[in-house]
Image: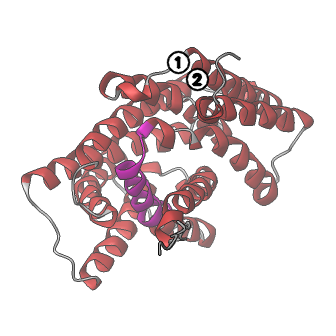
């Protein structure tokens, strides 16, 4: 007598790890521009240094508490070096740009990351090649971002220097995310260890930069600035970087970069709620274009559509 065995889909908590990580990274990247604005107070390198000191203390404590052996072999050191240099260079440029242009424009320029990351990914990962449909979807998304910020910000406030610094930071961040993805995707290295090692590399560099550019190291920040620094150190860097490196191990770098198409709009909404920044109808028109663009980029192949 044959027994029919039915295959049932079993729910596993681990199946939620990637989408939950995406959502958390989205939330963290949404709130980071405003937190940087609140924490800098005219001393961007000092602010970045304090942020990394808080983050490396937090992450190092967790690694020690978990009693996991901290890897220092050649492969791990290479990851720490690449990601640590990326954190230092890109974060320094973003902090400097935030002093010159509105924080919203930093977010919208960072929205160019999918194009830059997609280009760099296509050089090493053939499956991530930018097809005409993907390019069209990204173009719609970028057009939506333009609507959002051309309506919500005063173009007279824009500094060319700040725009250039942000664009360079985007290129560096995008390129190193692809490099880091290649280094960690087959490496048994937990995200928290990657974050800790990267911050160990980046923190002394921020100290040197702060001493050279802001030798007085003024720590007389307001309580609001200190709260923002704690948030950036514990959540923005400690949790955010860990989740980011976890995602890099499991999904392609250009798919992670899609988050940057959504965060400018969500960041503008948070800025309106917490910092009284105005919201206008063009924001929601732009949001619609961004959603359509993401749909074309991410889901069009799965829907089996041959043509637009």
Relative to 288, residue 65 above or below: below
What's the magenta region? 236-253
Q: Main secondary structure of the magenta part?
A: helix
Q: Say which quarter of the image contains residue 252.
A: top left
Write the residue at 67% across / 15% down: 307
Relative to 241, residue 138 above or below: above
SS label for mark 2: helix
Does residue 80 belong to the magenta stretch? no
Q: Position of residue 71 (x, y in %)?
A: 14, 65
Q: Is residue 62 left or right of residue 140?
A: left
Q: Position of residue 177 (x, y in %)?
A: 36, 40
Q: Position of residue 26 (x, y in %)?
A: 59, 53
Q: Position of residue 238 (x, y in %)?
A: 42, 66
Relative to 193, residue 297 above or below: above
Q: Which mark is residue 134?
A: 2
Circles 2, 1 touching at the beta carbon (< 8 Å) = yes
Relative to 215, residue 190 above or below: below
């Amino acid at each position: 007598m044959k027994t029919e065995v039915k295959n049932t889909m079993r729910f596993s908590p681990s199946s939620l790890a990637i989408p939950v990580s995406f959502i958390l990274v989205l939330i963290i990247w949404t709130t980071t521009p405003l937190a940087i604005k609140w924490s800098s107070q005219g001393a961007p390198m000092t602010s970045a240094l304090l942020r990394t000191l808080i983050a490396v203390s937090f992450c190092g404590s967790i690694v020690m508490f978990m009693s996991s052996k901290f890897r220092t072999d050649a492969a791990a050191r290479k990851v720490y070096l690449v990601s640590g240099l990326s954190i230092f260079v890109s974060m320094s440029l973003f902090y400097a740009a935030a002093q010159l242009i509105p924080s919203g424009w930093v977010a919208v320029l960072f929205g160019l990351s999918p194009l830059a990351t997609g280009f760099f990914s296509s050089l090493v990962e053939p499956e991530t090649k930018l097809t005409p449909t993907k390019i069209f979807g990204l173009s719609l998304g970028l057009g939506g971002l333009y609507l959002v910020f051309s309506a919500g910000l005063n173009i007279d406030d824009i500094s060319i220097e700040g725009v250039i610094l942000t664009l360079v930071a985007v290129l560096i961040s995008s390129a190193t995310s692809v490099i880091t993805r290649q280094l960690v995707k087959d490496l048994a290295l937990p995200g928290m260890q990657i974050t800790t090692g990267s911050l160990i590399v980046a923190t002394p560099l921020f100290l040197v930069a702060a001493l050279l550019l802001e030798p007085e190291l003024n720590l007389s920040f307001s309580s609001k600035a200190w709260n923002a620094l704690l948030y950036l150190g514990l959540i923005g860097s400690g949790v955010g970087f860990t989740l980011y490196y976890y995602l890099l191990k499991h999904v392609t770098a250009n798919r992670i970069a899609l988050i940057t198409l959504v965060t400018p709009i969500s960041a503008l909404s948070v800025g309106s709620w917490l910092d009284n920044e105005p919201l206008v109808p063009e924001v929601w028109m732009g949001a619609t274009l961004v959603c359509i663009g993401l749909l074309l980029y991410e889901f069009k192949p799965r829907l089996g559509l041959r043509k637009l």
